[in-house]
Image: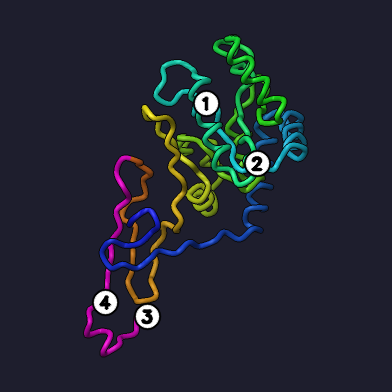
Amino acid sequence: MDEAGVCQSCGEKLVCIDIDPRETENFASSLTKLACQREVKADFVQFQEWLQRHGPFDAVVDGANVSLINQKSFSFFELNSVVNRLRQISPSKRLPLVILHRSRVTGGPAQNPNNKKLIESWKKSGALYATPAGSNDDWYWLYAAVNCNCLLVTNDEMRDHLFQLLGTSFFPRWKEKHQVRLTITRRGPVLHMPPPYSIVIQESEQGSWHVPTVTGDDLETPRQWLCATRTRKNHRHPQHLE
């Protein structure tokens, strides 16, 4: 498949299956319930109220994950380069929402004068939320992205215990359509956008079948598909598939 979802074997294009908005609303509700059970409820409710005032956003950034990509130490420089790139491609040209743990915003590299200025500018723009001490920021950035129905920038595979609680029916489909992965090059950050097609078994208008052969998310090796096409004689003597 090329980037647009056109099969290089038969020339047919994969389709995108939309998610029912009601499913997204139900997922946001269950996410809230789980987060309030596992976080300090007052802290999470405060975040929801903040998001109501400052949102919606076109993108949410998992600040810690992005800042540590290809780095042994926390890098505000990398984070800022991703933020600026997202602002450029944003339909509204607004800053994305950066979620960072409070300790990242007050200690360590945050004490650097340039980083301090950067943090203050994000705060003034309503583009930074510092999660409280003892919290798991995963709940915050995931809820924000679901609530705003926007892009989520993280290389987190989202497979640990927290994400297993979310089930396997809706969450993988949502993740497939919203997660933006990232690689850092000498020229700057490269954003790997969600595919414009659904990664499910599909039958095309001309009768070709396309089957995704792997379920992994490796950026280095493009996903392989099996393409099954009808022979010419089947078109002259149609056979109905049950």
Three-letter amino acid code of the residue under disc 3: Glu
| Badge 3 density bin: few <14, some 14–19, many ≥20, Cα 10 Å | few
Asked if the stretch drawn in magenta spans residue 235, the answer is yes
Q: Nearer the viewer, mark 1 or mark 3?
A: 1
Q: Nearer the viewer, mark 4 or mark 2?
A: 2
Question: Which mark, by number, is residue 242?
Answer: 3
Q: Secondary structure at mark 2?
A: loop
* Gap between marks 1 and 3 measured at Cα: 52 Å
Decide if residue 13 is on the left or right side of residue 235: right
The quarter of the rendered structure image containing the N terminus is: bottom left
| Badge 4 density bin: few <14, some 14–19, many ≥20, Cα 10 Å | few
Decide if residue 212 is on the left or right side of residue 15: left
Q: Secondary structure at mark 4?
A: loop
Pointer 2 with pointer 1, Cβ within 8 A? no
Q: Residue at x 51, y 31 (%)?
A: 82
Q: Position of residue 126 (x, y in %)?
A: 71, 30
Question: Which mark, by number, is residue 57?
Answer: 2
* Gap between marks 3 and 2 measured at Cα: 45 Å
Q: Residue at x 57, y 9 (%)?
A: 112
The quarter of the rendered structure image containing the C terminus is: bottom left
Q: Secondary structure at mark 1?
A: helix
